[in-house]
Image: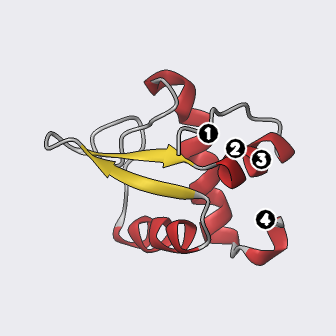
């Protein structure tokens, strides 16, 4: 995935969760973690899902971001190490 294929808002959302991933065993919480997920950011997460960069898991207690191989590769392009768990 090329950064140019993402809107600035989607890229910023992706990078925020990628930077936070190390605090959550590479699966940062969507809403109850270190990032306040706004309505706009939820739309950006949907964009990231559609582009195959993340999936959103739900364990019944809350939603969390899971990075795909493509998501891990994009994070690496920005100097962030994230394990691909999907």
Sequence order check, earlier mark of 4 and 2: 4
Q: Which residue is mark 2?
A: 72
CB-based contact (under 8 Å), mark 1 and mark 3: no
Task: Work out which quarter of the rendered image holds the N terminus and state it.
Answer: bottom right
Mark 3 touches mark 4? (CB < 8 Å): yes
Say which mark, if any, is on residue 1: 4
Reading the chain from its start, which is encountered first: label 1 or label 3? 3
Give the spatial CA distance, label 1 vs label 2: 5 Å
Depth check, front residue: 85 or 45: 85
Q: Which mark is residue 13?
A: none
Q: Is 73 displayed left or right of 23 in the figure? A: right
Question: Is residue 49 placed above or below 58 in the rendered structure?
Answer: below
**Left or right: 46 in relation to 80:** left
Tag 3 secondary structure:
helix
Q: Which residue matches tag 1?
A: 84
Question: Which mark is first along the chain, 4 or 3?
Answer: 4
Labels 4 and 1 touching (C-beta < 8 A): no
Label 3 vs label 4: CA separation? 8 Å
């Amino acid at each position: 995935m090329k950064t140019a294929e993402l809107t600035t808002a989607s890229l910023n959302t992706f990078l925020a969760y990628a930077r936070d991933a190390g605090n959550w065993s590479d699966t940062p919480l969507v809403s109850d973690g270190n990032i306040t997920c706004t309505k706009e950011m939820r739309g950006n997460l949907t964009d990231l899902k559609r582009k195959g960069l993340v999936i959103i898991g739900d364990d019944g207690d809350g939603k969390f971001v899971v990075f795909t191989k493509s998501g891990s590769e994009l994070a690496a392009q920005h100097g962030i190490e994230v394990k691909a768990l999907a």
